[in-house]
Image (tube, rainbow, N blue to C red):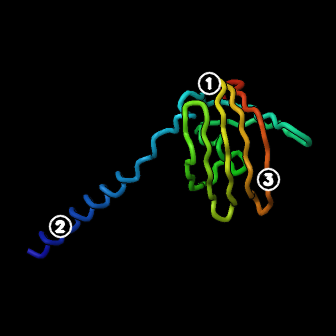
Amino acid sequence: MMTMKLRALCVAAAMMTAGWAGAAIAPPPMAALRTLETGEWELRGRGEGAETQKLCVTDLRQLLQVRHGRALCRSFVISDAAQAATVTYDCAAAGNGRTELRVETTRLVQISSQGVAQGAPFAFVAEGRRIGSCH
């Protein structure tokens, strides 16, 4: 009798755990990111001291937190339309930021971002262009 109760309790616990795991569904993709293509992107900074960097984008949300790479960050969508989005994000000890992204084509975006990364403030404006597949 005790074994059957224990078995029933284990089955119930497993079902509850599976239900909780299924509840962590990824949010729907942002409208501004839906038309963009993954792959290798080149970000050309604008202004004095601007840098150019290449980025293998496998998740388009990477374009929203360029200075924080693949850090796990909580983000809050301020605005999201087909051609533009604004988000703020918090990466705990890694820093935080606010990014505005404007979509020009499926392979061309304008990015403006500012925040704190590695304990120092940053601000940049860049043009992002998809240049091919990741190597």
Q: Nearer the viewer, mark 1 or mark 2?
A: 1
Of the image marks 1 and 2, the number of the one nearer the N terminus: 2
Q: Which label is found at residue 7?
A: 2
Total marks shown come to: 3
Q: Is residue 81 visible?
A: yes
Q: Residue at x 55, y 31 (%)?
A: 82
Q: Nearer the viewer, mark 2 or mark 3?
A: 3
Relative to 28, residue 132 above or below: above
For label 3, the residue is 122
The image position of residue 16, as x and y in percent, is: 27, 61
The amino acid at mark 2 is Arg
Q: Is residue 135 visible?
A: no
**Left or right placement of residue 125 versus residue 12 in this view:** right
For label 1, the residue is 106
The amino acid at mark 1 is Thr
The image position of residue 7, as x and y in percent, is: 17, 67
Secondary structure at badge 2 equals helix
Q: CA distance from mark 1 to mark 3?
A: 27 Å
Q: Quadrant of residue 95?
A: bottom right
Q: Residue at x 57, y 48 (%)?
A: 78
Q: Nearer the viewer, residue 77 or 90?
A: 77
* Residues at circles 2 and 3 in contact by the CB criterion of under 8 Å: no
The image position of residue 90, as x and y in percent, is: 62, 58
Of the image marks 1 and 3, the number of the one nearer the N terminus: 1
Q: CA distance from mark 2 to mark 3?
A: 56 Å
Secondary structure at badge 3 equals strand
